[in-house]
Image (cartoon, grey):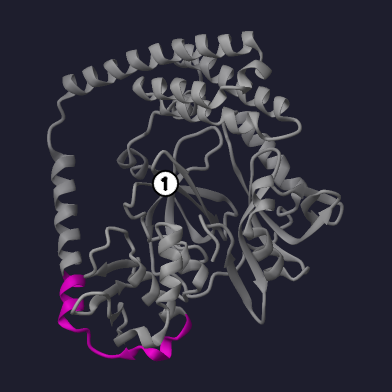
Amino acid sequence: MDWSADRVLALAPDAGSASAGQGLAITRKWSSLGASDRAIWGLCQGSGKDPYQTRIDLGEPVFKCSCPSRKFPCKHGLGLLLLFAKEKKSFTRGAEPGWVSEWIDGRAEKAEKKAEKAKAAAEAPVDVAAQAKRAAVREDRVRQGVTECRTWLDDLLRRGLAAAQSNAVSECERAAARMVDAQAPGLAGMIRRIPPLMSSGAGWEVRTLEHLGRLHLLLSAADRVGELPGELAGDVRVAIGYNQPKEEVLAGQGVSDLWTVVGQAFEEDHHLTMRRTWLWSKRTARAALVLDFAAGHQPLDTSLVAGMAFEGEVVFYPSGAPLRALVKSRGEASRTAEPPEDGGANAIGANLERFARALSANPWLTRWPMVLHRTKVFRAGDRWMLGQGEELLPLSPAFERGIHLWRLLSATGGREATIVAEWDGEAAEPVGLFVDAGGTRYVGLVTRWAA
């Protein structure tokens, strides 16, 4: 696939690595630059006696460097791929040196052994009694957590939102930590979203009360989850923090289509990085959300890169409004991703109607993807807007304050474009953009730092 600076920098583990990688994307800093059909490599002189050996398997991509950095990818890997993105002619095509070919072949061998081990584990007999005992212990802890959360919420509302503002951060953090102990991380996440809402400016009390209403609804549903219809019960359990094993999801029937990675967004919380990757199918015109998590400086999966397209099968988690999914299989990524087709369903009004229907099926949805064709970005009063004729969506305050707004304005130049955005019920946050610049070009908009 074709690489751009946006796509490469979206792989960086932090802002410092992104900046340092850009500083290394210069030909004179490298020697023995080479490329094959599956990899690129080069030597970069560091502070030590011997230059660092940097290699990249372009298939996923996967990075390997002999430097001592514990970040993945390191600045040398980012610099090498950035250089490849802008100056392919600087890389001599030829046979891979041993330190490259042995690494890639070794990865393939390890992957094969891992698959065999996973197969053996799946075929091993299951201790049903022990499994049931663990499940019962967690159910009891979650029930206790739900009871404690309801008591805490009642106390907060009894004191009043204004009174709770003064120490919201410390109080909510203590309550969230208790929910983590109770093995209900979904409740913890909802509690941690309260302080930002309380400090969100004019109208904060309305936004906070709406969020607390959803929390109260979840607690009430948790008490009678056994009486709820299957899909709704599943959504309640997911909102509380239960996870369905990936193996169970992947065993289900998938949707085969041409999928495009139309946008990515990152969220960081307590040393945990979460990445949301939005896919859009060409023939069935539906969205899919792939979530990835990494703790500390652990690398995120790099197989889905913003702007790529692939033929593959995607399996959705059971839900009243199916959105989260896993990629079950995929073919080779295409070099140029095209924007989703405009079948008349990409108007702002149509997107809002779909969001309303999804929210009625799953009240705990926090984000909904919108692919908006022929959309402009402009300022109306004191807010920035996305507009299609008379239909408007306000941009989120966080996006308005960031550098990404100016990247969006620069890329569109005041012209209409296809904009991919996350909608939270009040504001839109663009995460991807397709512009016509002598042939359609994808522009990644949201990473954790400015490019």
Quadrant assignment, res 59: bottom left
Report the quarter where the C terminus lies: bottom right
Picture coordinates of residue 349, whole percent (x, y): 77, 46
Q: Is residue 92 magenta?
A: yes
Report the quarter where the N terminus lies: bottom left
Picture coordinates of residue 13, whole percent (x, y): 39, 57
Q: Residue at x 27, y 90 (%)?
A: 94
Q: Is residue 136 magenta?
A: no
Residues 46 and 148: in front is 46
Q: Residue at x 47, y 76 (%)?
A: 2
Q: Secondary structure at mark 1?
A: strand
Residue 364 visible to an observer of this rendering = yes
Quadrant assignment, res 121: top left
Residue 234 visible to an observer of this rendering = no
- The local crowd at label 1, few if under 14, some if 14 to 19, many if 20 or more residues have their Cα within 10 Å, is some
Quadrant assignment, res 407: bottom right
Residues 314 and 271: in front is 271
Which residue is labeled 1 in the image?
273
The reply, left or right, for residue 350 in relation to residue 431 is: right
Residues 98 and 409: in front is 409
Residue 398, above or below 109: above
Q: Residue at x 36, y 54 (%)?
A: 300
The reply, left or right, for residue 245 in relation to residue 240 is: left
Amino acid type at mark 1: Thr
Picture coordinates of residue 356, whole percent (x, y): 69, 35
Picture coordinates of residue 230, whole percent (x, y): 47, 24
- What is the magenta range? 86-105
The reply, left or right, for residue 260 in relation to residue 252 is: right
Q: Residue at x 40, y 76 (%)?
A: 24
